[in-house]
Amino acid sequence: MADRAALEFRGNSPSGRDQLVKRLGDQITVQESDWNCGNVFTPNHKRKPFDDVRVRKALFMAVDQWAGAKALQKIAIVRTVGGVVFPGSEFAASQQDLAAMPGFATDIEKSRAEARRLLREAGAEGLSVEMLNRNVDQPYIIVGTWLVDEFRKIGVNVTQKIVPTGPWLDSMRAGDFALAMEANCQMVVNPIADVGRYLPHELYPENFAYHDDPKQVEIYNRLVRETDPGKARVLMREYENQVISVGAHQLPTLWFYRILPIRSYVKGWKISTSHYLNQDLANIWLDK
């Protein structure tokens, strides 16, 4: 029984899912979905050298999200490359939109060469720095470890400081970090509301980039008032570009992927895009 319980606890990872399916067969049903949640890599703009946009942009340009998605989805609950907007939703960036921004290049060697140039120009070659991360294996530590290796490819040595959730939040709220792994997890997919978490800390206190960007705020204020979907999509691209390309404030990394193994006798459950939704068990029943 203990062994089975352990397998079930690991069932929300790709390997855990596969173990459960192999062991339990038709006794288990697996539901999967893209998740309105994803890690966000955050440089603290109040800490040198990350007050320099060239250094922030260089770190973004080191990351090969396309190759990362293919590799990490085998071991972690991440799968989809996307920008600030939930992939596949109305205002989400296309692959072509993404490829034009640092952190999403399809020619990664060219991108990394430019990253190394930016570091030289900023006087930040040979940079060594600590990245704050949450002690949650799926997927914080896995994604963080991947990023550490990506940064190494442009000559930046990053070590992870992995701490429990409480101290992780406390350090970010106090500004006591240089780099951090955050997450943007929302409920019902509502792109215009969801991307508000990228606004400066003064307006969105749980954004710990500690940056100022009046232009970003101005774009967002127009976005929330725009009633024409076509025009709103154009504004969303401007907003996303301001966050990632112009200011290099934060880099959304791979979006999470929900894997929910359920006993086959559990009926009425339907997976959603958020772990905050479908918590009412009124329509769930056991065929047993």
Image (spheres, rainbow, N blue to C red):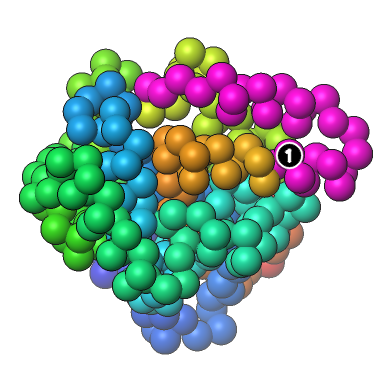
**Amino acid on which the number 1 mark rests in the picture:** Leu
Residue range in magenta is 210-236
Q: Is residue 287 visible?
A: yes
Vertical placement of 159 versus 227: above or below? below
Q: Is residue 77 magenta?
A: no
Which residue is drawn at the image coordinates 82% and 25% (left, top)?
Answer: 225
Is most of the magenta stretch helix, strand or loop? helix
State the quadrant of the N terminus: bottom left
Q: Could you say which quadrant of the image residue 214 lies in?
A: top right
Vertical placement of 13 versus 193: above or below? below
Vertical placement of 17 versus 144: above or below? below
Vertical placement of 251 versus 25: above or below? above
Q: Could you say which quadrant of the image residue 137 lies in?
A: bottom left
Nearer the observer, 178 or 191: 178
Q: Which residue matches tag 1? A: 235
Question: In what element is the residue under mark 1?
Answer: helix
What is the x, y in percent for residue 86?
63, 51
The furthest residue to the right = 228
Q: Is residue 133 visible?
A: no
Which residue is drawn at the image coordinates 63% and 37% (left, top)?
Answer: 239
What is the x, y in percent for residue 113?
28, 65
Q: Is residue 14 left or right of residue 185?
A: left
